[in-house]
Image (cartoon, helix red, strand yellow):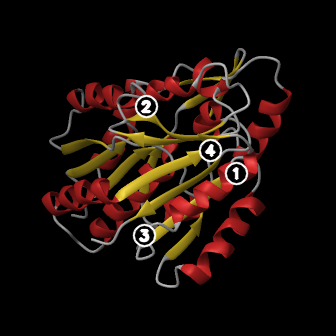
């Protein structure tokens, strides 16, 4: 039987890619006040960012319930007895814990391997795609797990934010708290390090932040893949990629999307890159 891959909606994968690779995505929930929306199902990124700009209150998020994971695992257990479930960092969410509790409640004799990706968004998505490709090639469960963990070492996520306000108010600022202070006009550049948000640099203007991100993106011109996404609009990310292509002809570029849950904390106008080193 083919190993099945499960992840959560913070992977920010395009629905077409999810379908093409046979990936099962368990959604988190976004709340605007008392209104609840399943990420990627009941609210799209476009609708979310429109509401984010207009909302007088900061939206919040909630991890998937144990029941959501249990139902997902039970359904897949009818097709396979091997599942690899890969999720956003346990230092950013309790999602992995919900999955762990659900695994213990599965009635069928199914082997479910839980993996903490120690990242999120495009980083998680890149790792999940590597795992799904291995599974589609008929790899054993042990091999899929090995491919996943090796991918975790090769995937790096960096983003230029317009503000730290959303991370701070959302309680996910982590070590990037060190960028706070009197310099209210700074444009922070952050990365995900060891499963939490960490400071990388800070610059004075949006234009400088984008240029610095460009420099970071071209540090290793032998990269296998790079995903680029912006919470403002696809055009900025597309232009960023077009600037990179001539300098990195051997790198596979993808236009990414930063979804609703991650957008709660990244805020509007965030530009992110996910680099995938060669194995």
Numbered disc 4: secondary structure: loop
In this orientation, does residue 64 appear? no
Q: Which residue is mark 2?
A: 68
Q: Which residue is mark 3?
A: 220
Q: Position of residue 167 (x, y in %)?
A: 59, 27
The single residue placed furthest to the right in the displayed view is: 54
Q: Is residue 278 above or below residue 207?
A: below
Please name which of the two marks, 2 or 4, marks the residue nearer to the observer.
4
Q: Quadrant of residue 236?
A: bottom right
Please name which of the two marks, 3 or 4, marks the residue nearer to the observer.
3
Q: CA distance from mark 1 to mark 2?
A: 43 Å
Residue 208 badge = 1
Q: Residue at x 62, y 48 (%)?
A: 258
| Nearer to us in this view, 204 or 68 | 204
Q: CA distance from mark 3 to mark 4?
A: 27 Å
Identify the mark nearer the N-term, 4 or 1: 1
Look at the image and tell me in which quarter the N terminus lies: bottom left
């Amino acid at each position: 039987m083919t190993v099945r891959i499960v992840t959560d909606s913070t992977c920010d994968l395009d629905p077409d890619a999810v379908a093409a690779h046979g990936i099962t995505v368990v959604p988190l929930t976004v709340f605007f006040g008392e209104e609840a929306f399943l990420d990627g199902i009941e609210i799209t990124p476009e609708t979310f960012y429109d509401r984010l700009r207009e909302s007088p209150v900061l939206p919040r998020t909630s991890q998937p319930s144990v029941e959501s994971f249990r139902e997902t695992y039970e359904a897949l257990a009818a097709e396979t007895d091997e599942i690899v479930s890969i999720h956003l960092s346990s230092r950013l969410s309790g999602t992995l814990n919900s999955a762990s509790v659900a695994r213990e409640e599965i009635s069928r004799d199914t082997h479910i391997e839980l993996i903490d990706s120690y990242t999120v968004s495009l980083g998680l998505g890149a790792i999940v795609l590597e795992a799904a490709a291995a599974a589609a090639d008929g790899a054993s469960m042990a091999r899929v797990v090995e491919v996943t963990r090796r991918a975790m070492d090769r995937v790096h996520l960096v983003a230029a934010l317009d503000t730290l306000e959303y991370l701070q108010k959302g309680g996910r600022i982590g070590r990037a708290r060190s960028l706070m202070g009197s310099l209210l006009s700074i444009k922070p550049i952050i990365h995900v390090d060891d499963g939490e948000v960490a400071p990388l640099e800070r610059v004075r203007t949006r234009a400088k932040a984008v240029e610095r991100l460009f420099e970071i993106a071209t540090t290793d011109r032998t990269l296998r893949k790079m995903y680029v996404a912006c919470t403002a609009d696809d055009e900025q990310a597309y232009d960023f990629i077009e600037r990179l292509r001539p300098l990195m002809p051997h790198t596979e570029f993808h236009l990414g999307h930063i979804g609703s849950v991650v957008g709660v904390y990244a805020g509007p106008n965030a530009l992110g890159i996910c680099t995938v080193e060669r194995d």
